[in-house]
Structure formats: C-alpha cells, structure tokens
Amino acid sequence: MSLKKTVNEFKILLRSIPATVVTLFAVSVICMNLLANKTLLQLDWIALDGGILISWLSFMCMDIITKHFGPKASTLVSIHAVMINLLTCLIFYIVSIIPSNANDYSAYDSIFGGTWFILLGSTVAFLASAVVNGLLNHLVGQMFKRKPDGKAAFMTRAYVSTFIAQFLDNFIFSVIVFYFFAPIFWDGFSWTILQCATCALTGAVAELIMEAIFSPIGYKISKKWKRENIGKEYFDYIGKEALK
C-alpha cells in the first residue's frame, strides 16, 4: 500500500475509533514515560518502576483495537501515540532548559528534561512490543474457531500477547539503557544480559497480573463496539481497497 493510501486509511481509522480510547492510549504512553523515572522496587531478580501502574492501560487499548480493527490498526495507533509522546517530551525538554529565577526547579528540570537514551530505549521497546502484541493477539484469536468473540477468546489472546510483548518491551529497554548506555553515562553502572532477561521476565509477570485485573473492562468495551457497529466507515474503506 502506498504512503498516501496509508495516511488516508489512518485518518479514517482515527475517525472510527472512539476518541476516549485513543486519548487514554496516548496519555498512558506519556505517563509511562514520566512514571518510569521512579523505581518502585529493585532487587537482584526484579526491577519495577512507576510505569507498571499505567502500562496495563496501553496494552488493554491495543488489545481492544486489535480485536475490533485488526493488528495493522493497532500498530498505526501505537505509532500515533509514540509521536505524541515524543512531541510532549520535546516540549518538556524545552521548558526544562529555560532558566528561571523564581525558584529552585532543579528537581523539576531533572524529571521533565528526561534522558535521551532512556527515551530512545523506551520508544524502540514500545514500538517493537506494540507490533508483536498486535500480531500475537490476532494470531491467537484466529485459533478460536468457535466463539471467537467469547470471553475466553478475548482473555487468552490478551494474556498471551501481553505477556510476550511486555517481556520484549522490558528486555529491549533494559538492554538499550542498562547494558549499552548506562556503563558509558552512569559511571560504569550496568546490567548483564542475564539480569536484563530476568528482570524482563519478572516484570512481564507483574504486568500480566495487572492486565488480568483490568482486562474484563476491555472485553466489555469490545462487545459494546461490536454491538454498536463501531468503525463502519473504516471497514467499508478497507473493503473497497481490497477489491481494487
């Protein structure tokens, strides 16, 4: 598909997905980036940051979009959320470097100014995990020939895709930040590949638990969308394109 057709499809997709879900998705990605600045738990075998409290929302939104619109739609909306996050980070950075004599804003500047290689790691990791999550969710869903729209099908595809995608997200982020860049910029502090994998695995388990708690909400939304025929314009468009 040409770039022009993809852009056209994306415009129709954004009109078709209820604005609340798109908004919550973008906000959750921005919040993950900010909340990740605080480590909530750090042991030899697990490390959890504040992002775990909101990451479930990002993956639930992806699961809902994938279930109703397909994996390509989920990937397009994920790219959209990442671009909004990058723009937000740029604005935060500009504000952080503007001097002020009104007060001591060093803590504020440190948090909102961010660290470039952490942003790089989180962006690459999220995009990779978003693509994997959408494809896995879709593939697992195809295994349910009977009752593909049932609760068991939705939960299975959400749990499998979320666990694997979250592991990939955590692992890529850890390798980029703690294996490659941390030794250079953080006075020799670093993780081994084994530590990256172990923390990615335990973090994925913790994030899967959060997903399990909130996924019933996603299932109800998915059922509501199908009942109300959400996205008719988008499905009509891709149907016409497929016939060309």
Image: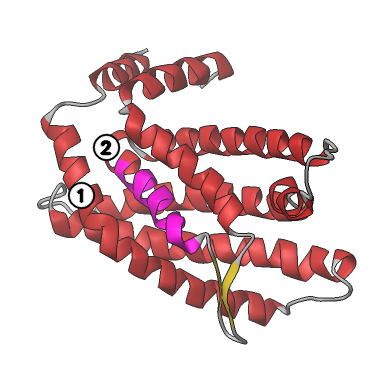
Image quarter of residue 97: top right
Query: Which residue is more in the foreground, 102 or 210?
Result: 102
In the image, residue 75 sits, relative to residue 201, either above or below, namely above
Q: Residue at x 87, y 64 (%)?
A: 185
Residue 68: mark in rendering: 2
Q: Residue at x 62, y 87 (%)?
A: 44
Q: Is residue 166 left or right of residue 223?
A: right
Q: Earlier in the sequence, mark 2 or mark 1?
A: 2
Please report the bounds of the magenta region as a residue range.
Answer: 52-64
Q: Residue at x 43, y 41 (%)?
A: 25
Where is residue 145 shown, x and y percent of the image?
15, 51
Q: Do the residues bearing badges 2 and 1 touch, measured as CB atoms within 8 Å? A: no
Mark 1 sits on what residue?
Answer: 219
Q: Residue at x 51, y 18 (%)?
A: 7
Residue 159 belongs to magenta span: no
Q: Secondary structure at mark 1?
A: helix
Where is residue 234 shown, x and y percent of the image?
31, 20
Where is residue 99 shown, x and y percent of the image?
85, 38
| Kind of residue at disc 2 | His
Q: Callout 2: 10 Å neighbours few (<14), some, many (20+)?
A: many
Image quarter of residue 155: bottom left
Inspect this view and state whether residue 131 appears: no
Q: Is residue 109 left or right of residue 174?
A: right
Q: Secondary structure at mark 2?
A: helix
Query: Which residue is more in the foreground, 111 or 163?
Result: 111
Q: Is residue 66 left or right of residue 83?
A: left
In the image, residue 10 sits, relative to residue 211, either above or below, namely above
Q: Main secondary structure of the magenta part?
A: helix
Inspect this view and state whether residue 149 appears: yes
In what quadrant of the picture does the C terminus appear?
A: top left
